Amino acid sequence: MSYPYELGGETLWDAGYHSGQLYASLARGAAEFVKLPTGLTPTPQGSCDIELLTFRSFVQGLYGTYSSTRNPVLHGLTRGLLVTSLVLLERAGAPITLKPEHEEALREEKAAFTRSMG
C-alpha cells in the first residue's frame, strides 16, 4: 500500500503508506509552528495533492526556521522534513535557494533521500 504525493496528476513521490502518512503529519505540525499552510491536501483516493506555490512557501518558511538558528535540537527536528520537502520541490521543478553554509550538507542528504524516495 502506498501514499502518493501528486502534482497535476504526476506522482512526485510514491511513498510507502506509513512514510507518506508520517510526512503529512510532520508537515501539518511544522505548518502550525511556521504559521504557513502546507499546500498538501489528502485525497479520498488515499494520496496527497500538492499545490505547488503554497507548498513552496511552506518549505521556504521551514528552511527559514532551520537557517535562522544554530540550535542542534531544532535542526535535528526539522531536518528530515526539510530534506524530504526539498526533494519534492526539485521533482516539481521549483527548488528553493539555500544559503551557501547549508548547501553542501543538504545536497548530500537530498541525494540520499532521492535514491530512497524512488
Image (cartoon, rainbow, N blue to C red):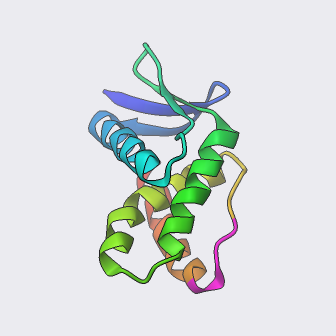
In the image, 92 versus 98, the foreground residue is: 98
Identity of the residue drawn at 65% across and 84% down:
100
Task: Residue at 68% x, 58% y: name it.
Answer: 95
Q: How many marks?
A: 0
Residue placed most toward the observer, 33 or 79: 33
Residue 42 occupies quadrant: top left
| Vertical placement of residue 29 versus 46, above or below | below
Q: Residue 84 in the image: x percent, y percent?
A: 47, 55
> Which of the 4 quarters of the picture holds residue 10?
top right
**Near-viewer residue (8 or 62):** 62
Residue for point 43% across, 13% down: 44
In the rendered view, tell whether residue 62 sits above or below residue 108.
above
| Magenta stretch: helix, strand or loop mostly | loop
Residue 98 is covered by the magenta coloring: yes
Which quadrant holds the N terminus?
Answer: top left
- Work out whether 99 lies above or below 32: below
Give, as a single range, the part of the protein colored magenta.
97-101
Residue 97 screen position, x and y as percent: 70, 68
x and y percentages locating residue 115 in the rendered image: 46, 58
Q: Is residue 68 above or below residue 1?
A: below
Is 89 situated left or right of 84 in this image?
right
Name the residue: 31% across, 33% down. Answer: 17
Answer whether residue 108 is magenta in the image.
no
